Amino acid sequence: MRTIILNSSQVHQGPLLLINSSHPLPESYSPSLVCLPCGSGVLMERHAASLLQACVQAAGGTRQIVPVSGYRSQAEQQSIWDESIASSGISFTEKYVALPGCSEHQTGLAIDLGHLSSHIDFIRPDFPDEGVCGVFRKLASRYGFIERYKEGKQNITGIAPEPWHFRYVGIPHARLIEEHSLALEEYSDFLSQRPWRYAQEGGRRAMIFYVHCTEDKTAVTIPDCCCQVSGDNQHGFIITLWEAE
């Protein structure tokens, strides 16, 4: 066994950050970005970009699935918000555009995808359930992505359903969130109820549990194994312990 020390600042770091109107982007957040290899100029967090590319290839969608919008700066998000209000009104904008400073796109972990066509709507791109897009949707959680804003979760997320918007949260969290039909807003409370064990495809097992941050430094005793820690941008840490292969 070993003890790890988690600083309170780490609550605002990691791929499982909840970003919404009640939990804005931490000022210190600075993702490592790369350009997606499709000539679109769309940026994404480095690790998430690699797994997105792998998922698109596995779905057979290299020529049909188009990245529409990835990372956005504060200025870009503000511009999109202002333009949407001017063209479509405040009611539409509040349903489909996050407030500047409260957008997942500003983390670099979110991507809007569209099906290749002569015209792609930047705010609401077409990403159907059938065909190659449907295959991508079925595979997404295996690569660490969730469909972030689903039908029936509007009262929790504050955003209308967006079948084109995917968020990287990592493996095995995406599978757990999808299997239990959770919104990301519900995940920390879900994990607080008890530790969860998860068997990844291929047999590798993980245990996931939640630790509340109660002071400047939180000590956690864990087994000697691979450990991944992500803050949730709320009250604590989501810890993933990978058993030895």
Image (cartoon, rainbow, N blue to C red):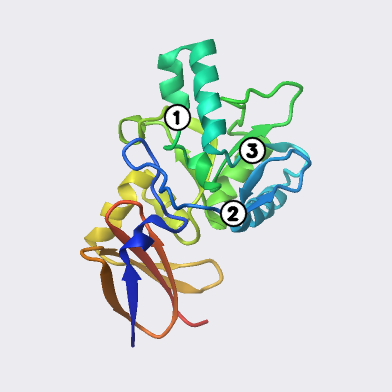
- Residue type of the residue flagged with mark 1: Pro
- Image quadrant holding the N terminus, namely bottom left
Q: Residue at x 72, y 40 (%)?
A: 41
> Which residue corresponds to mark 3?
133
Q: Residues within 10 Å of mark 1 (few under 14, many from 20)?
A: some
Give the foreground label among 2 and 1. Answer: 2
Q: Identify which amino acid the numbered label 2 is placed on.
A: Ala
Mark 2 vs mark 3: which is more N-terminal?
Answer: 2
Q: Which residue is mark 1?
A: 161
**Residue at 40% of width from left, 86% of height from top?**
224
- Residue 75 percent coordinates (x, y): 54, 33
Residues at circles 2 and 3 in contact by the CB criterion of under 8 Å: no
Residue 115 in sight from this viewpoint: yes
Q: Earlier in the sequence, mark 3 or mark 1?
A: 3
Which residue occupies the foreground of this view, 95 or 172?
95
Near-viewer residue (77 or 239): 77
